[in-house]
Amino acid sequence: MVHNGGCHCGKVRWEAQAPQSVTAWSCNCSDCSMRGNTHFIIPSTCFKLLRESEQFLSTYTFGTHTSKHTFCKVCGITSFYVPRSNPDGVAVTVKCVDPGTLNHFEIKYFDGRNWDRSYEKSSIASLSKLETENPIANDSN
């Protein structure tokens, strides 16, 4: 299924290939908790920026600088980003998906304040793998 979405002002637009029902993550790290972000993770090969979106993006990093928090330079919305847990993937903000294609999402919690322990306990790293790489990860997605 192809989901379309983007930021508030519409300058950043993208498409993401993912099932109609996904596992979304709510994180309590310092960044996600302030933004109230809930996202689902897909392989980077399943994500495509549309039109001239790239020129309207800016990126913020902190800590390990592994995650790339992208946001629209015009309206400030983070509709997607590259998460620390999945540097080979993209985290798509659930509320930034256009209505009509995302039928259901289950929310799981990631303890970003205790990142290393939570990462080891979860299967989050497998979510950015293609089905051929890890079919079990996509069953939960």
Image (cartoon, grey):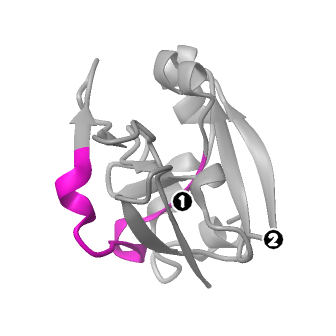
Which residue is drawn at the image coordinates 26% and 28% (left, top)?
Answer: 61
Which residue type carries mark 2?
A: Asn
Q: Relative to residue 28, is residue 104 drawn left or right?
A: right
Which image quadrant: the N terminus?
A: bottom right
Numbered label attached to residue 127: 1
Numbered label attached to residue 112: none
Which image quadrant: the C terminus?
A: bottom right
Query: Along the line of sight, which residue is nearer the eye, 86 or 12?
Result: 12
Q: Residues within 10 Å of mark 1 (few under 14, many from 20)?
A: many
Residue 28, given in percent of the width and then of the height, sits at 61, 21
Circle 2 sits in a helix, a strand or a loop, which is it? loop
- Residue 101, quarter of picture: bottom right
Which residue type carries mark 1?
A: Leu
- Does 89 sit above or below residue 60? below
Q: Which residues are magenta?
A: 39-57
Quick check: is 83 in the magenta stretch? no
Q: Relative to residue 9, is residue 23 drawn left or right?
A: right
Q: Residues within 10 Å of mark 2 (few under 14, many from 20)?
A: few
Question: Which residue corresponds to mark 2?
Answer: 103
Circle 1 sits in a helix, a strand or a loop, which is it? helix
Quick check: is 41 in the magenta stretch? yes
